[in-house]
Amino acid sequence: MPLISVVVTACNNAELLSRCLEALSRSTNQDFELIVVDDASKDGTVDVARRFTDKVIAFESHRGVNEARTVGYTTARGELIVNLDADVLVFPDTLDKIRSVFALCPEADAVTGMLSKKHPFQNFSSQYKNLYMHYIFNQLPRRVTFLYGSLFIFRREIAKEHISDIRYGGDTLFGQQLWLKGKTIYLDKSIEVEHVKHYDLRKLIRNDFDVPFYWSCIFLRYRGIRQVGKNGVGFAHASLRQLMGLSSSVMIMLLMFMEILGMTVFPYLVACLIIWSLLNGGFWGFLFREKGLWFATRSIIFTFLDQIVMLSGIISGLIYFSLRQPRGNSSQKSH
């Protein structure tokens, strides 16, 4: 059986890290190396880590999650390296599933997992975000071009490929780097983890602006426009249906303003509403089955507002990074 190295990065989240490492300690197979990289925490994060492993790397100054991951990866001895966020809980059989996937798929260079429907916080924002991510990933094909930070695994020999220079989306960028070099990345929907991050409305809106903002940087850098529509997907973990939903929500908003201003656009508004509903109807049906009518009804309104926020993040990012970055990388080619 291949040795697994689990790399957990943390910064000022002692309580969450404790839960993360406790869950790891309950794994049915204990044959793994655990490395914790602490990014200059001011709380008891390092003390928590040292209760579970003597392989703790503590930065003296803040260097960011991407550099913390790189240091952890290059330190690892395992044939398979598991990236695990500190706010994620594995299930007892997660590591066994990882071993099985790589044994059955020797061609796989990397595998990414997804979020379970299970979530400890019952407030609307936390449940909505968790179920949204679960649903979106379930719609994606098996072979993908990204990695998802909460849990992804790769073979040790490609650890040197991890280079990231953006604040958010380093996992997606890593996946694009691997894909452009011909590496095989699978999304295995049987490998799930529980995300224990709490969202309130402010945090959710901020997250859903920031992530698309930096997503657009990766989109520009790796010529995402050439990837849109291939194999029925959009770009990275954003499906074509999801991108169309964002676009149609903005069209609805614009047509509503035009109607208010006295322009006769009502038939077009109705048509856009129908298209938007068809694009998002599967998600709302999923929420109805999982959480009931009242939750699904509130989600219809929130989905519209959230998609406006996401698209605002994308547009802002495209403008910002197109002005900041050098034009394209001629050495990088899309498949």
Image (cartoon, rainbow, N blue to C red):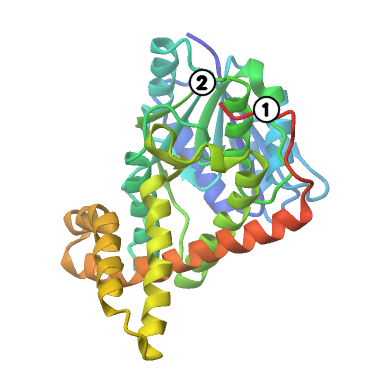
Residue type, mark 1 in image = Tyr
- Residue assigned mark 1: 73
Total numbered badges shown on the rendered structure: 2
Residue 207 shown left or right of residue 67 in the figure = left
Q: Is residue 68 left or right of residue 214?
A: right
Residue 1: % across, % down: 47, 8
Q: Position of residue 63 (x, y in %)?
A: 78, 47
Residue displayed at 55% across by 45% down? 86
Residue 61 visible in image? yes
Vertical order, 81 against 263 (above or below): above
Of 141 and 299, nearer the camera is: 141
Quadrant in which the C terminus appears: top right
Q: Residue furthest front?
A: 264
| Residue at (36, 27) in percent of width and height | 93
How far across and down, in percent of the image, does residue 78 sit? 60, 17
Whether residue 300 is situated above or below residue 23 in the rendered picture = below
Amino acid at pointer 2: Thr
Q: Which residue is rendered at x = 51% and y = 20% of the image?
A: 184
Asked whether residue 42 is in view, the answer is no
Residue picked out by circle 2: 184
Q: Secondary structure at mark 1?
A: helix
**Is 310 placed left or right of 138 in the picture?**
right
- Sequence order check: which comes first, mark 2 or mark 1? 1
